[in-house]
Image (tube, rainbow, N blue to C red):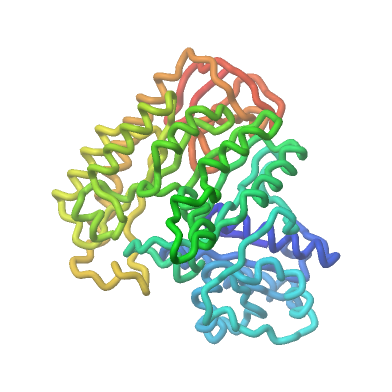
Amino acid sequence: MISLGCAKNLVDAEIMLGSVLERGMEITANADEADVLVINTCAFIDSAKEESIEAILEAHQQRLTKRQNQKLIVSGCLSQRFGRELRDELPEVDAFVGLDQVDQLGAIAERVMARDTIELAFADARPKYIPNYDTPRFRLTPVHSAYVKIAEGCNHPCSFCVIPQMRGKHRSRTMESVLEEIRGLVAEGVREFNLISQDTTYYGMDLWLEKAGPRQPVDSMRGPTLTRLLREIQKIDGDFWVRLLYTHPAHWSDELITTIAECDKVARYVDVPLQHIDGTMLARMRRETSRKHIEDLIDKLRAGIPGLAIRTTFIVGFPGETEKHFASLLAFIERARFERLGIFKYSQEDGSRAAKMPDQVPATIKNARYRAAMSAQQKIARRIAETNIGREMKLLVDQPHRARTEADAPEVDARVILRKAAPVGEFIRRRITGSRGYDLLAD
């Protein structure tokens, strides 16, 4: 399997491979040996779609020269969103798998090998599937780190995004399901849990609404929330980190901030994509928040959680973004001094509200704004890294000479380069001796 895209897509890939093993099949790391090759695609932005199409075509060309009887299956967001069109344009693909079928890949692979026709019924429906703690899964992450998907889908109306169209409405797992999964993984030696969904701060709200009904106020229910989930995770025996990814600024609460501060197993790290700071841009993006709300939230987070590292992302070149709007964003980045920050150039997604907006920004301007924002952040990141020199820090070892701090999520953030080798998958304490770009150096 070739899995592209985000961590949420990676969990889908793990579930698909789990269903393959459950059917008695074997998984191989060598594509040339496989009877069935799966491309798990991403369709979030244009570059991701292009990468997915290229991977499909390359896989087909490879099998023509190396293994002509190999079957090719395409899964993931691209398949879910464009399966019907792709079936006509890519007849070389043997089957397209929707997001509601991720736990059925093993059975689908058997049918493909038997030359059965796989229908595309999923192409006309929004996904509803959500995994459980006992869903078979073959983890693709290092043995000491895991992604735990606590919810699926999204209810937000962001004008630049089509994820709700691809992945359906927000639907949370039960607390019991999430806790059982984490307990099992702790027993296997996992030291880091990265909680993911399209919006982790919305976790449980849909379950409250279902229980409350049309006549009962939601706030009278004692339903699941992210705050309650974190406090229950805190009670689980073991030495591990819990990290929050993909939170939404509109759903943070004082209670959640207090909970993180009081739970020492919750990493002092939050990922909260802000996308912009200018009020006009936030309104055009339909972000359900305001500049004042964001600035107040950042102040509350820093005051309420000592030692917190904040990761965020911004979009430059959104339709209608003027030099004044961008200057406002750049000034905010320089003032807020985020520990971790990423920049996306706006991608005009078919089917989104923003794709039809006037005043689309030329690519040359997007590129220039991207470079300016990243240049500003690189200076901030270097200064922040230098403040850690001389400190002794708790690190999680990914490789004998590579580790991460509590402030670094896997794959997207910085690393600590170790002079002396350390045992992989364990926590260690080392003194920081220097910095190199975004990365730190340690004894």
Q: Is residue 323 left or right of residue 118?
A: left
Q: Residue furthest top?
A: 390
Question: Picture quarter containing residue 9?
Answer: bottom right
Give 139 or 239, whichever is nearer the viewer.
Answer: 239
Residue 234 in the image: state x and y as whole percent.
Answer: 61, 33
Residue 266 in the image: state x and y as whole percent.
Answer: 55, 33
Give 150 or 405, whichever is nearer the viewer.
Answer: 150
The answer to whether residue 213 is visible is yes
Rendered residue at 67%/28% (across/down): 239
Rendered residue at 28%/37% (across/down): 296
Give 440 or 393, whichever is nearer the viewer.
Answer: 393
Rendered residue at 33%/55% (across/down): 345
Give 176 or 430, whichever is nearer the viewer.
Answer: 176
Rendered-image quadrant of the C terminus:
top right
Question: Picture quarter containing residue 105?
Answer: bottom right
Q: Is residue 256 above or below residue 57?
A: above
Rendered-image quadrant of the N terminus:
bottom right
Residue 170 in the image: state x and y as whole percent.
Answer: 49, 62
Q: Is residue 420 above or below residue 51?
A: above
Residue 169 in the image: state x and y as whole percent.
Answer: 48, 66
The answer to whether residue 61 is visible is no
